[in-house]
Image (cartoon, rainbow, N blue to C red):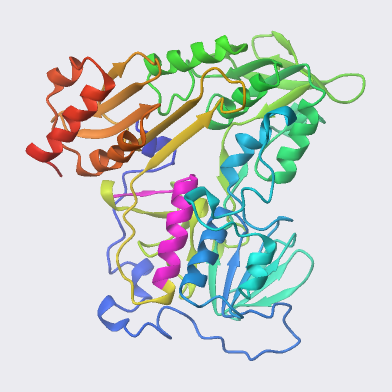
Amino acid sequence: MSLVSRLTMAISLRMAPLSSPLHSKWPSASTRHPYVGLIRRSLVVKASGEFANENREFVIVGGGNAAGYAARTFVEHGMADGKLCIVSKEAFAPYERPTLTKGYLFPTDKKPARLPGFHTCVGTGGERQTPDWYKEHGIEVLYQDPVVGVDSHAQTLTTSSGKLLKYGSLIISTGCSATRLPEKSGGSLPGVHYIRDVSDADSLVSSLERAQKVVVIGGGYIGMEVAAATAGWNLDTTIIFPEEHLMPRLFTSSLAQRYEELYRKNGTKFLKGVLIDKLEAGADGRVATVKLRNGNMIEADTVIVGIGAKPVVGPFEMVGLNSTVGGIQVDSLFRTSIPGVFAIGDVAAFPLKIYDRMARVEHVDHARKSAQHCVRTLLTAHTQPYDYLPYFYSRVFEYEGSTRKVWWQFYGDNVGDTIEVGNFDPKIATFWLDSENRLKGVLLESGSPEEFELLPQLARRQPVINRAKLEGAHSVEAALEMAKNSMQFGSTV
C-alpha cells in the first residue's frame, strides 16, 4: 500500500461531483466574479463591546505553520491590517514546527534552534514573522486561548477563557494532536514525552539534560528524528516498534537497512517486531521501565512516544467530516460545506487531483501551500483547483560534530515495483515503477540541489522508463539522467 494511501491516510475516493452537497451550496465559477459577497460572508454585526476581537473580517483558528503562511498571504494582498485575527492555543507566534524534532533537540553545545529563529516563514526563505511582525501588519493574535465552541449561524466563536469572537470568514487550521498511550498504561507518567509544540520540546530537552537511558517508541518520522538527536547527546537510546523495519510506509526493507545501520554506528539500538505492554514508574514516580508484551523489560528514565497523530476537529464537526481519511471535508478550493468557512493544513481532507482520490496530508509542505491557495481563493477570483504533489523529507544528524548528515526527499506515490540505485555513500535513490514502467515515485538521499529539483518534475510527469536500463545504472547520477531523458523523449502523463 502506498505512502499517500497510508502515511497521509489517503484513499481511492473520487472527488465529489459538482451536484453533491459539498459543491451545491457554492456559486459556480461563472457567477463568482466579482468575488466579494460570494466567497466571503459579510460581517453582519458592527463593532461593539460584545465581542473580544477587534479584527473580525477574517479569523484563523489555530496558530501553526498554516496560520503563519496564511497571514503572509493576507499581507501580500493588502487584506490583513485591521481585518485578520488569529486565535491560537500556543504562547508563541506561528513557527516552523518540523524544527521541534530536529534542530531544537540538539545538545546545548551544538547550537540548538530556538525562537525567534524559526518563526514562519523562514522555512521557505521568507521573512521571520515575530510577534512584532503581526503587530506591524495590523494582525490581531490571541494567544493561549483555543476555540472550544462555534455558532456558524451567528458567525461567532467561543474560546476556553470564555471570550466571544466574531468572524466574517473563518479558516480552520487546527492541525493534529499527538496520539498518546493510555494513562492506565503509563502514558502520562513523568518522563514520558510527546512532541507537538515548543512546550513539549522544552520539557523533553529538560529530560535529556539528565537522562541516561532513552527509549523511543515508534519507528516513523518522530522516532527517527528524535533518535538522531539523542545520538548527539551520547545517550543510551533504543527504538522500539512493531514493524519489521524503520519507516515501513515509505522505505523498502533494503533502504531501511541502510539507515538502521547508520543509526547503529551512532549508538542507537533497535527492538523490532515487538509491542509495548505498559510503562512503569520507579520509586520516585518517574518512568523507569518499558514492559513489552513478550515479557521483556527495558530500563528507561526518558521515553519519547511517536506513534502518529490525529486531526483536531473539535468543535468543528458540524462543518462536515470525512469518515475515511479523517479531518474536515473540503473541496479543491478548501471550502467546507458551510459558506465562508474553510479548512487548511493537516486537518483538511481534500481532493488529491493528481491521483484522483481524497487525502489528508500531515506535512509542512502541504500546510504552507494549502494556506496560500485557500487565501488566494478567498481574496481573489482565483478558482484553480488545488493540485498538490505529495512530498516528504527528513534531515537528521545535522548537529556540529556529526560524521554523516542525512537528508532525503520523496515525491509522488510509492506504488508498484522498486528499483534501488546507489550504495548510500552518501547517495542512494529508489524509483517506484508501475506495471507499464511509468515512474510513480522517487526518493533520493544526499542529492545535489539540481537533483532534488528534478524529483518533483519526474513524479508529476510520470515518464515511461526503460526498466532494464534503470536497473543497470552504475550510479545515482546516471539513473537520474536516464529518468530525465525519459521525460524529454518518452511518453508522459
Q: Is residue 19 left or right of residue 435?
A: right
**In the rendered structure, which segment of residues is drawn in magenta?**
356-377
| 69 up-or-down from 248: above or below | below
Residue 447: percent from the left, percent from the top? 36, 29
Task: Indicate the quadrant containing the C terminus: top left, top right, bottom left or bottom right.
Answer: top left
Could you say which is closer to the camera, residue 273 or residue 383?
Answer: 383
Determine the residue positioned at 73% across, 10% down. 297
| 128 up-or-down from 112: above or below | below
Q: In the image, is residue 375 part of the stretch drawn in magenta?
A: yes
In the rendered image, which quarter is residue 161 located in? bottom right
In the rendered image, which quarter is residue 477 located in? top left
Residue 128 is at least partly visible in this image? yes
Task: Indicate the quadrant containing the N terminus: top left, top right, bottom left or bottom right.
Answer: top left
Residue 240: percent from the left, percent from the top? 61, 18
Q: Is residue 437 left or right of residue 139?
A: left
| 160 up-or-down from 380: above or below | above
Magenta segment, prevailing SS (helix, strand or loop): helix
Q: In the image, is residue 138 part of the stretch drawn in magenta?
A: no
Residue 431: percent from the left, percent from the top? 27, 26
Determine the residue positioned at 44% across, 24% down. 248
Residue 118: percent from the left, percent from the top? 61, 48
Residue 180 is at least partly visible in this image? no
